[in-house]
């Protein structure tokens, strides 16, 4: 069974993941639930680095994830809880391998 089959079985195909490695060994992943996003644009307006934009369907997407400073204003301000910011420090999961 491949990853697409698993994602479909768990209904995870509605999530869009944008990942980028930041400076100082940090990585940030934007997890956006396209079904929950109503396209209000609040997250877009609060983002200090213009990482987010509304797509042609009026849903948010991370168009410049490499510019994200992980301030989490988008996650905190989203009234629909459609955005999650996952931060990971380099080497954080090395002990689990």
Image: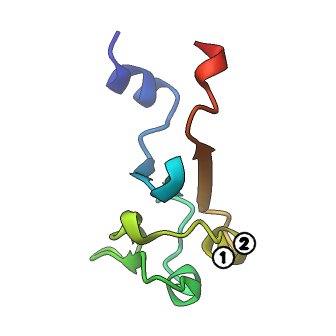
Q: Is residue 89 above or below residue 60?
A: above
Note whether residue 74 is visible. Answer: yes
Point out the residue furthest to the left here.
56
Q: Nearer the viewer, residue 2 or 88?
A: 88
User: Residue at horizontal 55%, vertical 39%?
Assistant: 90
User: Residue at horizontal 38%, vertical 79%?
Assistant: 54
Q: Position of residue 76 (x, y in %)?
A: 72, 72
The answer to whether the residues at label 2 and label 1 have Cβ atoms under 8 Å apart is yes
Structural distance between the alpha carbons of marks 2 and 1: 5 Å
Q: Nearer the viewer, residue 27 or 17?
A: 27
Point out the residue furthest to the top here.
1
Q: Is residue 22 above or below residue 92?
A: below
Left or right of 44? Residue 42 is right
Q: Which residue is mark 1?
A: 73
Residue 42 - label: none
Q: Which residue is mark 2?
A: 76
Q: Quadrant of residue 56?
A: bottom left
Screen quadrant of the C terminus = top right
Crowding at dot 2, Cα within 10 Å, few <14 / some 14-19 / many 20+, comes out as some
User: Residue at horizontal 47%, vertical 24%?
Assistant: 9
Q: Position of residue 78 (x, y in %)?
A: 66, 74
How many marks overall?
Answer: 2
Q: By what rule are the colours in the image chosen?
A: rainbow
Point out the residue furthest to the front here.
24
User: Residue at horizontal 53%, vertical 74%?
Assistant: 38
């Amino acid at each position: 069974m491949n990853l697409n089959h698993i994602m479909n079985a768990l209904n995870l195909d509605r999530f869009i993941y944008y990942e980028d490695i930041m400076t100082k060994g940090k990585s940030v992943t934007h997890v956006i639930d396209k079904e929950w996003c109503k396209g209000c644009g609040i997250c877009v307006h609060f983002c200090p680095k213009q990482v987010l934009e509304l797509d042609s369907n009026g849903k948010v997407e991370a168009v410049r994830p490499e510019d994200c400073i992980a301030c989490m204003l988008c996650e905190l301000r989203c009234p629909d809880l459609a955005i999650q910011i996952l931060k990971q420090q380099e080497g954080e999961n090395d002990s689990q391998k």
